[in-house]
């Protein structure tokens, strides 16, 4: 029992030293990933320093959640969903459109060409001639002929320096400006209402996808961290084996020199030491690979040196992750997973989303009612903005007036309000086909949800069995380590008394090392099984992971 306690104590005390042995000698400073931050500070050394970055499990999880690209993509999906919600609400908000145009009329046709209206609109017609003769009769003056009346008007215009254009469109102008504002407010649209509901549902789906990604990333980091710790502690065990082999070789060499034992035993001790050193080299290489894998999972630069803080035993008893004893019950564990798993909630919401999309497709059968208000401002501005004025008392007296570009004669506003209804009565059965497609998607979503529920149940059952198996192995290997330690102490004592051979001592040493490695493997498997179970149950795993969740059950 005392030997086992010594082993546990040595495991914690030698952790720092064994990690230092794993680092290559003379390691130079490596540049730190520019994105690395931890609680607002850079815990890594600055450029030019060779100090490794010390990582705890919680710090590794925090870094991974900040740097993981899959999680970053899931967060972008949430942001996109937020934008979709705003876009959907935009279909129900008032819409204000501004329009404007300019037209240059180079040549315009006379719409009255070939009709008698031309004589009525030309000015100086027979009506004015008759009125003029009537005034002359009242003044006892003789009337004049119509051609004479027209000739006098032309002579008067020429004397005033005024030339009247003829032909073309009498209503046409050279420049036309139009500007308008249209305000539209949707009063009823079944599709728009369904779109708002569906966009909010899509946002919730995206949030649960992101939360599940947080849990899976945390699981990957914790598993890689435990694997790196196991590789690191394997190195420590083999370091102790090399030390024992060196002590054995020294003791055997001394006894050979005294002639107590044959030289063949020293050769055997040399072989044992060489094998132990080879195994240590392989273990160090495996530890380096495990740390590189951890850095890749976290998102650190491969050149960044790291040092792991903690041990497998500490992780087992740290209380950071605790699986309630009640959840170990198979049926309760499955029920908890079905209630807490974000991906199951996402699948359920996805079914509802498909139902909303089906409702939106059916909305195309209904009319759309909108209130509309229009304000327009039009300008019809000719190039020649002069105007001929006639003396009301003298039909042969004319004057010319110049008007400005923005004269009220050319510009005028208009305003109107109303309701408009749009209702597509037949679309070639396209709407019915879209409704059918949406219904198929809804049934597919239900099938995927049911498949996921079954997969979750199997995943939880496997995780519970793996956890129980690892727990039993820990208890078995703990007792085995204690027995192997006592056996090694007993054989060492017998070798010192000459009652046992070096071969028996090497066998006892091998058994001790193997039992320790088996125990560490069992602890590692227990930690991984516990992490897998917590992930299968939909638990946040760590306090850091919980702070990254966007939904709460």
Image: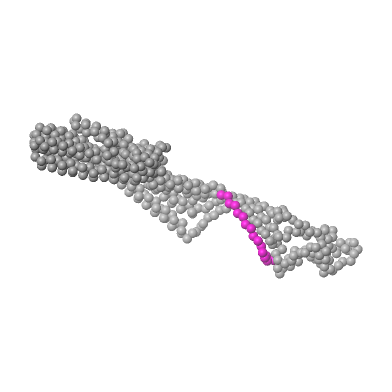
Color theme of the render? one colour
Task: Say which quadrant the N terminus sits in.
Answer: top left
Figure check: 30 above or below 177: above
Estimate the x, y position of residue 264 in percent, counting from the top left: 10, 42
Task: Say which quadrant the C terminus sits in.
Answer: top left
Picture mark count: 0
In this view of the protein, which residue sits in the foreground, 8 or 389? 8
Q: Is 175 left, or right, of 483 in this rendering? A: right
Which residue is drawn at the image coordinates 68% and 57% (left, top)?
Answer: 380
Q: Residue furthest top?
A: 2
Figure check: 87 above or below 382: above
Q: Is residue 143 magenta?
A: no
Estimate the x, y position of residue 145 in percent, counting from the top left: 84, 69
Estimate the x, y position of residue 120 in percent, counting from the top left: 76, 64
Q: Is 129 left, or right, of 307 in this rendering? A: right
Q: Is residue 106 magenta?
A: yes
Which residue is drawn at the image coordinates 54% and 49% (left, top)?
Answer: 186
Q: Residue furthest front?
A: 257
For the record, the magenta segment spans 95-110
Which residue is drawn at the image coordinates 72% and 54% (left, top)?
Answer: 407
Which residue is drawn at the image coordinates 65% and 51% (left, top)?
Answer: 415
- Quarter of the view holding residue 394: bottom right
In this view of the protein, which residue sits in the foreground, 534 or 16? 16
* Residue 289 in view of the camera: yes
Figure check: 401 above or below 219: below
- Quarter of the view holding residue 324: top left
């Amino acid at each position: 029992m005392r030997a086992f306690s010594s082993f546990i104590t040595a495991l914690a005390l030698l952790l720092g030293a064994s990690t230092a042995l794993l680092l290559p000698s003379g390691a130079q400073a490596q540049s730190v990933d520019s994105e690395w931050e931890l609680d607002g500070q850079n815990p890594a050394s600055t450029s030019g320093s060779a100090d490794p970055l010390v990582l705890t499990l919680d710090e590794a999880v925090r870094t991974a959640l900040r740097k993981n690209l899959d999680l970053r993509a899931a967060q972008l999906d949430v942001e996109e969903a937020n934008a979709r919600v705003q876009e959907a609400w935009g279909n129900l908000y008032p819409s204000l459109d501004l329009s404007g145009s300019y037209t240059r009329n180079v040549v315009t046709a006379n719409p009255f060409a070939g009709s008698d209206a031309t004589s009525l609109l030309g000015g100086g017609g027979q009506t004015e001639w008759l009125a003029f003769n009537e005034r002359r009769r009242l003044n006892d003056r003789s009337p004049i002929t119509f051609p004479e009346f027209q000739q006098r008007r032309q002579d008067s215009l020429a004397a005033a320096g005024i030339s009247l254009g003829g032909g073309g469109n009498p209503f046409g102008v050279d420049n036309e400006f139009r500007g308008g504002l249209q305000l539209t407010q949707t009063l009823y649209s079944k599709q728009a209402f369904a779109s708002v509901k569906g966009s909010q549902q899509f946002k919730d789906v995206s949030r649960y996808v992101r939360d599940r990604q947080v849990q899976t990333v945390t699981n990957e980091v914790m598993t890689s961290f435990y694997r790196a710790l196991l590789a690191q502690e394997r190195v420590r065990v083999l370091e102790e084996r090399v030390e024992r082999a060196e002590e054995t070789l020294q003791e055997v060499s001394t006894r050979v020199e005294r002639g107590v034992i044959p030289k063949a035993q020293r050769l055997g001790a040399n072989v044992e030491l060489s094998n132990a050193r080879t195994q240590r080299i392989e273990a160090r290489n495996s530890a380096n690979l495990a740390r590189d894998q951890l850095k890749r999972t976290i998102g650190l630069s491969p050149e960044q040196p790291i040092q792991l803080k903690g041990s497998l035993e500490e992780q087992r008893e740290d209380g950071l992750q605790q699986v309630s004893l009640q959840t170990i019950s198979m049926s309760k564990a499955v029920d908890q997973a079905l209630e807490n798993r974000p991906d199951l909630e996402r699948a359920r919401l996805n079914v509802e989303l498909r139902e909303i999309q089906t409702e939106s497709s059916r909305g195309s059968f209904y009319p759309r009612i909108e209130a509309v208000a229009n304000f327009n401002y039009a300008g019809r501005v000719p190039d020649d903005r002069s105007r001929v004025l006639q003396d009301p008392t003298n039909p042969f007296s004319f004057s010319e007036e110049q008007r400005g570009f923005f004269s009220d004669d050319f510009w005028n506003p208009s305003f109107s309000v109303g309701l408009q209804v749009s209702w597509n009565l037949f679309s070639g059965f396209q709407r019915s086909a879209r409704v059918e497609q949406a219904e198929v998607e809804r049934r597919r979503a239900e099938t995927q949800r049911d498949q996921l529920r079954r997969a979750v149940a199997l995943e939880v059952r496997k995780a519970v069995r793996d956890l129980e198996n690892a727990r039993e192995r820990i208890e078995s290997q703990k007792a085995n380590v204690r027995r192997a330690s006592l056996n090694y102490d007993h054989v060492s004592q017998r070798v010192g008394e000459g009652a046992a051979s070096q071969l028996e001592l090497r066998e006892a040493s091998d058994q001790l090392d193997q039992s320790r490695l088996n125990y560490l493997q069992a602890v590692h498997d227990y930690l991984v099984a516990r992490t897998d179970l917590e992930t299968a149950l939909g638990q946040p795993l760590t306090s850091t992971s919980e702070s990254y969740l966007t939904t709460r059950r």
